[in-house]
Amino acid sequence: MAEIPTAAISRLVTYLRILEQLETQDISRTSSSDLAERAGVSAFQVRKDLAYFGRFGTRGMGYTVPILKRELVRVLGLNQTWNVVIVGVGRLGQAIANYPGASDYQFQYVGLFDVNPALVGQQVRGLTVRHTDELRDFTRHNTVDMGFLAVPPEHAQDAAQALADAGVKGILNFAPVVIQPRTLERGGPQEISDEWRGLIVENIDFLAGMKRLAFYILNPHLKDAPTPEDPA
């Protein structure tokens, strides 16, 4: 498979959301032009993004909505269960735990962790909050694929390391800091420590989004324009 830009994966998520909306409207067929208009990109970009993963439509007839939706669900790995733990169960962590819709995409919360004695032992969404020190032992006895970080910025690096040590494969970081993998000095160039190899970190930074929004409101002409349509 060709190297796939990160932005293309983000657009696939957008296309999937659009297809779900079309289904609720009982619309059974769509086109690259229709998807492009709804997603704010060009039809060429839609076709290019989908072409990374195969051929899903018929030339001149477009796409069957349920089929394309099913294929995007498969491509994005949303046809399997993903076990998730949340580290940090303050207001943000509890809001994430209670956010509706996660289970619709096979994201299943299996553990909640915090260091605050006032929270440890509390029940949130049917789960007992455990101390973060128990995380590694928990993953020995339970399959955990992802960890969500909803801790204060000053604790984010330590919490991320705890998830890495526990063997979690991916981290969704809501703290407004850049998580750094642990490195080792071995007499030559620094190497990433074993527990960080292959670990994926995605950052969700609300404040960064607000800063970008402020800039583009002041400079709307600098916002990325859709890719020009291909001549075909």
Image (cartoon, helix red, strand yellow):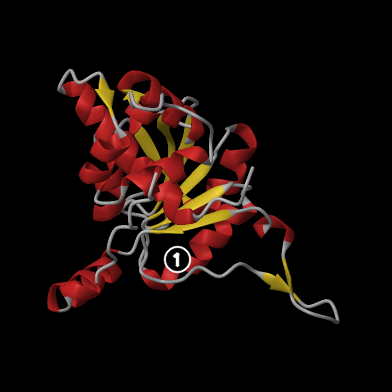
Q: Residue, x 52% and y 66% (percent of image)? A: 158
Image quarter where the C terminus lies is top left
Residue labelled with disc 1: 156
Q: Looking at this view, is 21 or 204 the one in front? A: 21
Name the amino acid, label 1: Ala
Of all residues shown, which one is farthest toward the right?
187
Q: Is residue 113 visible?
A: no
> Camera-side residue: 48 or 199?
48
Near mark 1 (Cα within 10 A), the count class, few <14, some 14-19 or many ≥20, is many
Q: Quadrant of the N terminus?
A: top right
- As drawn, 41 above or below 121: below
The residue nearer to you, when weighing 229 against 172, is 229
Spot occupied by residue 51 in the image (x, y as percentages of width and height): 50, 39
Q: Secondary structure at mark 1?
A: helix
Can residue 91 be seen in the rendering of this structure?
Answer: yes
Q: Position of residue 10 (x, y in %)?
A: 39, 49
Q: Name the residue: 37% across, 61% down.
A: 151
**Residue shown at the point (29%, 70%) measured from the top left:** 208
194 or 200: nearer the viewer: 200
Where residue 35 appears, x then y in whole percent? 27, 38
The picture places residue 9, in percent across and down from the top left corner, at: 44, 47
